[in-house]
Image (cartoon, rainbow, N blue to C red):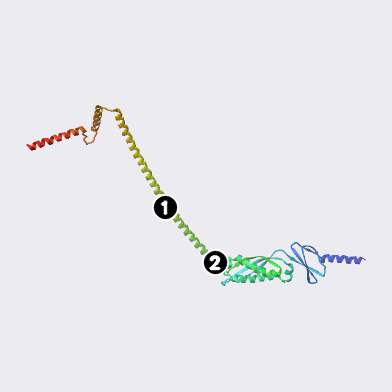
Amino acid sequence: MGGIIVILVILIILFVLFGVRIVRPWEKGVVERLGRYNRTVNPGLRFIVPIFEVMRKVDMREMVVDVPPQEVITKDNVVVTVDAVIYYEVTDPVKVLYNVRNFYMAVTKLAQTNLRNIIGDLQLDESLTSREKINSNLRIILDEATDKWGVKITRVELQKIDPPQDVMEAMHRQMKAERDRRAAILEAEGVKQSAILKAEGEKQSAILKAEGEAQAIRKVAEAEKYKEIALAEGQAQAIKTVFSAIHEGRPTKDLITIKYLEALKDMANGNATKLFVPYEASGILSALGMLKEVFERKEDKK
């Protein structure tokens, strides 16, 4: 009786060891019975029949494949060194187990082959500036090829595209020359723009100066005109005032005579060399001249 119990205990231990499986959250289990696919189990505590069934676990997380560097010839016969990184995730654990023997090696060789084909159709400059295009094309090709393996290619990234050293030095010299040319063009454009702005400034300054001088001349002329008009109006007003005062005062001939003589006195006291003759004296002189002519004619007749 004791031996039977021992045997039962041993069988239970063997069943636990070989029949109980724990599938983790990022895994799926593929159960084979007598060497043939039987079922796919999800994460959790799972049981299989020892000896008759075997469980193979498949990691369902996104994984990465590092494609080793390789030399590739571009369309213009330049040898470049290229390597890439492939990100993938398993979509069907059954296919990835039964449709491909070594997925890592298969996808690596497939990526290398297609990299040679893609870059071989591009010039060196295109291959250096079209990484996104190369990544997209390579991802599409790999995704189509690996679909039957139960794998989805999520991303493909080129890590580097390295031309030979002499080509890189030539490219650096070319880039430096191009930068120098652009700098010279920008400097020339700056000088040109500065000269244009300076000329425009001088032109605008001259225009504003001329306009200011013209405005000043107009203002001065208007001021002189206003001054002359004001003086003339003042003189006219003064004459009118004097004339009105004289007529309103009704001066006698005696007063006018006295004022006239005082004016003659003031004119005679001046230092000028001119001789002022009164109006009445000029009349007397004219009469004397006429008498002289009469006497001369009488003398001629005699």
Residue at position x 90%, y 67% in the image: 4
Kindly state the secondary structure of the residue where label 2 is placed: helix
CA–CA distance between discs 1 and 2?
Answer: 47 Å
Q: Nearer the viewer, mark 1 or mark 2?
A: 1
Would residue 300 be found to the left or right of residue 201 on screen? left
In front: 161, or 202? 202
Residue at position x 37%, y 45% in the image: 218
Would residue 105 be found to the left or right of residue 268 on screen? right
Q: Position of residue 2 (x, y in %)?
A: 92, 65
In front: 47, or 295? 295
In front: 148, or 125? 148
Q: Tell me the quadrant of the picture where the N terminus can be found.
A: bottom right
Q: Which residue is mark 1?
A: 203
> Label 2 crowding class (10 Å Cα cut-off): few <14, some 14-19, many 20+?
some
Q: Amino acid at mark 1?
A: Lys
Q: Residue 150 occupies which quadrant of the picture?
A: bottom right
Q: Position of residue 118 (x, y in %)?
A: 61, 70
Q: Residue 83 occupies which quadrant of the picture?
A: bottom right
> Label 1 crowding class (10 Å Cα cut-off): few <14, some 14-19, many 20+?
few
Q: Is residue 2 above or below residue 236?
A: below
Q: Position of residue 259 (x, y in %)?
A: 25, 29
Q: Amino acid at mark 2?
A: Met
Residue at position x 63%, y 66% in the image: 136
Would residue 279 be found to the left or right of residue 238 on screen? left
Q: Residue 242 occupies which quadrant of the picture?
A: top left
Kindly state the secondary structure of the residue where label 1 is placed: helix
Q: Which residue is mark 2?
A: 171
Asked whether the residues under the numbered discs 1 and 2 touch, taking CB atoms below 8 Å apart as contact, a structural biologist would say no
- The single residue placed furthest to the left in the displayed view is 302
Q: Position of residue 226 (x, y in %)?
A: 36, 40
Disc nearer the start of the sequence (1/2):
2
